[in-house]
Amino acid sequence: MPDLGRIAIVLVETSSPGNLGSVARVMKNMGLDRLILVDCRADLTEEARQRARGADDLLETALRTHGLGSALKPYNLSVATGSRPARWFERSLDPREMAAALKGLDPDQQVAIVFGPERTGLTNEHLQHCHWQVRIPSDPKFPSLNLAHAVAIVAYELSRGRSEAPSSGARRLAELGQIEAFSQDLEGCLKEIQFLKKQNPREIIMTLRQMLARASLDDRDIRILRGILRQWKWYARSNSEG
């Protein structure tokens, strides 16, 4: 399982300063110290600092960035949280299952756990950047959790999982930036052969992205796939010139 220092909590479009502080506090409780704020709509107010209760340093050192895809580029695995159904995820895990699944990765792999806006949760646009989905079991009559509570449950399972024995044969995944670059190259090739002129091109691209996510690609996989695309482009140019 990745070291807790290599696991980031990613908050997308957070609007409440109080939630920022509460999330920072529970992260510190559970030994997590990497916080990323994507398109954050909340300021570090006095309320945020009061809710942090000694975890102010996490708020001060939090990375603020624009765009979830950009924020996730250095990471090897991204995990979406929430209950929004998305058919391209092979399966949904509960937080304990997720922690157990992470034991299959090398300790130095970079993992991002992504939480959506308080009002809407993660949208389909956000979900296309994620490999796994985690759902916190709750009463169907009242399923919505407070953001900080959701982070607390996931962080607890991550903290609990670090004391368990690591699995053998741990994997090293490619960085999401590498996979994103390949996805963009693939999209360009598919446009060139007019494959994406068919119905719902956006849906096709999102499905392809999730196929790549399910494949759990490593560095060598990506090098081979990009080599195939380079050869494809060379062959296409050679034939057009002839």
Image (cartoon, rainbow, N blue to C red):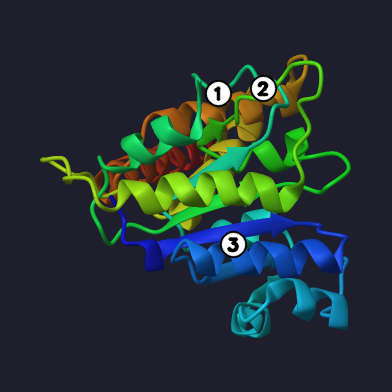
Q: Position of residue 65 (x, y in %)?
A: 70, 70
In the depicted view, which residue is nearer to us: 229 or 79? 79
From this view, report whether residue 174 is shown above or below residue 209: below
**Crowd class of label 3 (few under 14; some 14 to 19; many from 20; radius 10 Å):** many
* Residue in the image at 37% along x and 30% along y: 215
Q: Secondary structure at mark 3?
A: helix
Depth check, mark 2 against mark 3: the one in front is 3
In the rendered image, is residue 36 in sight?
Answer: no
Q: Secondary structure at mark 2?
A: loop
Q: Position of residue 67 (x, y in %)?
A: 73, 59
Left or right relative to 192: residue 99? left
* Residue in the image at 50% along x and 52% along y: 155
How far apart marks 3 and 1 lie (CA) works out to: 28 Å
In the rendered image, is residue 89 in sight?
Answer: yes
Q: Which residue is mark 1?
A: 89
Q: Which residue is mark 2?
A: 86
* Residue in the image at 43% along x and 28% along y: 214
The outermost residue toward the left is 168
Left or right relative to 46: residue 107? left
**Crowd class of label 1 (few under 14; some 14 to 19; many from 20; radius 10 Å):** some
Q: Earlier in the sequence, mark 2 or mark 3?
A: 3
Whether residues under marks 2 and 1 lie with C-beta atoms below 8 angstroms apart, the answer is yes
How far apart marks 2 and 1 lie (CA) works out to: 6 Å
